Image: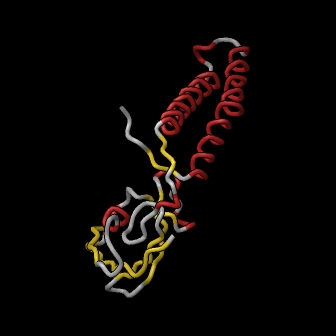
Amino acid sequence: MSKNIYVTEEGLQKLRAELEQMKNIERPAISRQIAEARDKGDLSENAEYDAAKEAQGLLEMRIAKLEATIASARIIDESRIDLSQVQILTRVKIKNVATKAVMEYLLVAETEANLKEGKLAVGTPIAKALLGKKKGDVVEVTVPSGIMKLEIVDISK
């Protein structure tokens, strides 16, 4: 039994589009590469054939993993998000107690994380420390450089 993966409607659509790309474009392209390499003769010393077969294996693994992710995906109802505490799909403004630097992140599912867009995966150490906490709480997060104290300044959508 696989664990549920929580995603937004938009995140699920992106996953489905990526799967379609792999199945309808990448898979046929690799099949053509294998056929072309096979037509060149002796397969025992054909590096193109070996590379294409390896690429095919990797693609099939990616397709299988993505299909499993989509099958276990559960869409989060954004209208039912409780803003009294930090949880997935809440935007949290935090302040580094030591440096006074203020950062803002939207906590999202692993599949939707993108630090450039301020989307932090719920599985990261910072997000794990913040989950379930309330505005005004100070959390300690172990990071490679040591322990960082973060104060929750605000929680919003």
In this rendered view, identify the residue nearer to me: 77 or 89. 77
Dividing the picture into quadrants, the one containing residue 137 is: bottom left
* Image quarter hosting the N terminus: top left
Question: Image check: 15 left or right of 6?
Answer: right
| Foreground pick, 44 / 26 | 26
Tell whether 104 sits left or right of 152.
right
Above or below, comparing residue 54 to residue 109 in the picture:
above
**Residue 54: quarter of image:** top right
For the point 32% across and 84% down, which residue is it? 97
Q: Is residue 38 above or below residue 60?
A: above
Q: Is residue 116 above or below residue 149?
A: above
Q: How many marks?
A: 0
Q: Residue at the bottom extreme? A: 100
- Measured from the top left, where is residue 91 in percent x and y? 48, 70
User: What residue do we see at 73% from left, 14% from top?
Assistant: 39
Residue for point 44% across, 45% down: 5
> Going 66% across and 36% down the picture, which residue do you hit?
20
Residue 145: x percent and y percent?
A: 30, 72
Q: Position of residue 69 (x, y in %)?
A: 49, 39
The colour scheme used to paint the residues is secondary structure
Work out whether 81 lies above or below 148.
above
Viewer-side residue, 66 vs 51: 66
